[in-house]
């Protein structure tokens, strides 16, 4: 591109928890927060529908739990399918609330909607720039299995100009809860900072509901790559009452 740097704009949204406070047969008639979760996901996806994003990454926990009726899955994937129909690739990382797999996966079938059912890498090309997006489902034993799962994506072999890692994990140093908050340090499901790869442009991560960008480890040393948490699109507990909710656009 003469005189213009090639860029790929990645719209990153996570932890939408669709179905939260939305019972199929409510016992009490009262205002439900469930529709707010759907509305906020649709608001977050608007830039992609307006041509302001080249790829969408959903960082996991699309749904509020793993066992849900097919009708809820159908409704949940519709906003993502509309983006895919508009020509924008959508990549979905299954989270812990999906138990690392999307229920009723046939409802999400679309050539431009990709679910990371196993560690793998997807290539996206825009304006002559090739970006490899590596992703893996949520790992309950991340401390011991992360390095092996990362290698299984094969991202280093992808013919790409830039690489992105897409996760749904607790990363060492991430925080949650009211200030000063809880900092993730150990635990079998926590990815050690030293295990993060240094040959990716950014790590897009779901699971922690507070938006934050990690650039240093617990000792103050620079991380191999910045870790970006989009946070959730809506407050799922009183502990999140002061947190700003939204989405992230990363320009590669």
Image: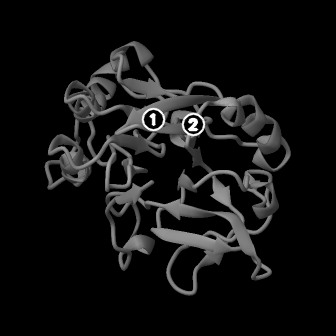
- Residue at 44% x, 26% y is 114
The answer to whether the residues at label 2 and label 1 have Cβ atoms under 8 Å apart is no
User: In the depicted view, which residue is nearer to us: 29 or 187?
Assistant: 187
Q: Tell me which corner region of the image, top left, top right, bottom left or bottom right, holds residue 186.
A: bottom right
Residue 183 visible to the viewer: yes
Q: Tell me which corner region of the image, top left, top right, bottom left or bottom right, holds residue 127.
A: top left
Q: Position of residue 126 (x, y in %)?
A: 36, 37
Q: In this view, does 155 lie to the left or right of 160?
A: right
- Residue at 22% x, 40% y is 26
Instruction: Determine the secondary structure under disc 1.
Output: strand
- Residue at 36% x, 75% y is 241
What scheme was used to colour the molecule? one colour
Q: How many marks?
A: 2
Q: Is residue 89 left or right of residue 168?
A: left
Q: Where does label 1 land, which residue? A: 92
Q: Where does label 2 land, which residue? A: 160
Instruction: Determine the secondary structure under disc 2.
Output: loop
């Amino acid at each position: 591109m003469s005189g213009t740097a090639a860029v790929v704009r990645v719209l990153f949204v996570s932890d939408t928890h669709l179905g939260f406070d939305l019972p199929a047969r409510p016992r009490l008639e009262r205002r439900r927060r469930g529709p707010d979760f759907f509305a906020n996901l649709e608001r977050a996806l608007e830039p992609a529908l307006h041509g302001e994003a080249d790829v969408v990454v959903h960082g996991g926990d699309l749904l509020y739990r793993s066992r849900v009726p097919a009708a809820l899955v159908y409704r949940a994937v519709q906003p993502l399918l509309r983006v895919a129909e508009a020509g924008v690739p959508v990549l979905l990382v299954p989270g812990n609330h999906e138990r690392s797999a999307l229920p009723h996966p046939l409802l999400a079938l679309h050539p431009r909607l990709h679910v990371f059912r196993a560690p793998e890498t997807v290539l996206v090309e825009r304006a002559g720039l090739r970006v490899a997006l590596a992703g893996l489902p949520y790992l309950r034993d991340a401390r011991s299995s992360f390095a092996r799962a990362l290698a299984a994506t094969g991202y280093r072999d992808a013919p790409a100009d830039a690489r992105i890692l897409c996760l749904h994990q607790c990363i060492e140093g991430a925080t949650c809860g009211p200030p000063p908050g809880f900092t993730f340090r150990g635990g079998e499901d926590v990815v050690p900072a030293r295990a993060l790869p240094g040959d990716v442009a950014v790590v897009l991560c779901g699971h922690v509901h507070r938006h934050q960008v990690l650039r240093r480890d617990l000792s103050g040393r620079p991380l191999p790559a910045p870790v970006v948490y989009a946070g959730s699109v809506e407050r799922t507990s009183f502990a999140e009452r002061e947190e700003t909710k939204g989405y992230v656009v990363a320009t590669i």
